[in-house]
Image (tube, helix red, strand yellow):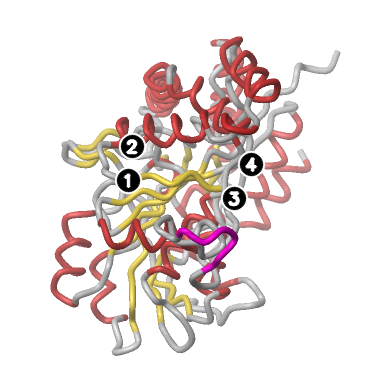
Amino acid sequence: MTKQRIYYTKPSIGEQEVAYATDAAKNGWGAQCYDYLDRFEAEFKAHLGVKYAIATSSCTGALHMGLSALDIGAGDEVILADSNWIASASPIVHLGAKPVFIDIREDTWCLNEQLIAAAITPRTKAIIAVHLYGNLCEMQALLALGKRYNLPIVEDAAEAIGSIYHGKRAGSMGKFGAFSFHGTKTLTTGEGGIFVTNDDALYERVLTLSSHGRSPTQTKQFWADTVGFKFKMSNIQAAIGCAQLERIDELISRKRDILAYYRQQFSAIDGIKINPEPDNIVNGAWMPTIVFAKNMGITRELLLRLFSEENIDARVFFWPLSAMPMFEAVKTNTNAWSIPQRAINLPSYHDMTNEDLERVANVVKDCVKGCVKIGVKNMAENNRFIEQ
């Protein structure tokens, strides 16, 4: 009998989300066309503790507008970590600038702040801090670097709802922040994102760009003051987001409980690292991830095979962006190139049962036991283990 499939992630949708979306579909037109959108922006900025928020069609769109408002363009460079989803780099490229990839830290898998100064050139115009899998970049050091070199620090907090750095929520500390509400995220609107900032002038620029370049102070109808973008979130999406925000503490808490379960299950296994939570840090735990020590011989391909055999979804750790054909390889980013080969994202959706979590943990434990038993040391031996 086939075991029930365990998905790596899916949203938690309740009756309130359905009710609000239905109301928006029935009544959210004409004078009410932005009611839920305005409410969602107001409630999200209150949750985050920032002055301004502009809901968008995606986190990518929020990044694109924010970087454009910082006048990043042809010939400029933007520094970011090599281990990221392509969405963090694509707005840079679309604006005509060059992404400069640096290595990640071995502990948080976020960009290594100690390598940034050496990568700064006269063309550097910004640094993007991507809070990977809910883990947090070292923001004190990054903000100090930004001040020292007069560079804006941009927070890509797509994966960091619920993460807190020394009392401040992820996304609230940099020049601007961007979040994702994709269906895989802790808080979802199906698709969608948001731009947030405390900078008055930057907010005004992005607000204009977000409406096809129409300034909010412009009195002429259908008059554009510049060429802008169309990255607006729909009112129906925002309605779902409003219901999700009413449950935000519950949604974050459940994610953290799942990460805590995995951490406890693997705590006695030497050679496994899981999402860290140092002092003065709260990890929002979007995506529990485990990385195996090199000498264990456990690879991404082996893990995917074993999870598939148990009818369990698993996600690979992000490939290094510099490994992709549109970029120049930076193999000196050794952590970014090595860690994905021996790591896996674990299922963590809100409605997972204790039995689901146990099934996932047992795959990892059995994999470790099997590899130790036969003395796996390299990929060739991994492949032989897979065939057994």
Q: Residue at x 42, y 67 (%)?
A: 67
The x, y position of residue 314, in whole percent, is 64, 37
Q: Quadrant of residue 75?
A: bottom left
In this figure, which residue is indicated by the disc labeled 2? 45
Q: Tell me the amino acid under the disc marked 2.
A: Lys
- The part of the chain drawn in magenta is 219-224
Q: Tell me the amino acid under the disc marked 3.
A: Thr
Q: Residue at x 40, y 41 (%)?
A: 160
Q: Quadrant of the N terminus?
A: top right
In this figure, which residue is indicated by the disc labeled 3? 299
The reply to whether the C-beta atoms of the residues labelled 1 and 2 are less than 8 Å apart is yes
Q: Is residue 169 left or right of residue 361?
A: left
What separation in Å lies between label 1 and label 2 (alpha carbons)? 6 Å
What separation in Å lies between label 4 and label 1 (alpha carbons)? 43 Å
The reply to whether the C-beta atoms of the residues labelled 4 and 1 are less than 8 Å apart is no
| Picture layout, residue 173 above or below residue 257 | below
In this figure, which residue is indicated by the disc labeled 1? 52
The x, y position of residue 204, in whole percent, is 35, 59
Q: Is residue 366 magenta?
A: no
The x, y position of residue 288, in whole percent, is 47, 35
Q: Which mark is residue 303?
A: 4
The reply to whether the C-beta atoms of the residues labelled 3 and 4 are less than 8 Å apart is yes
First-in-chain label (2 vs 4)? 2
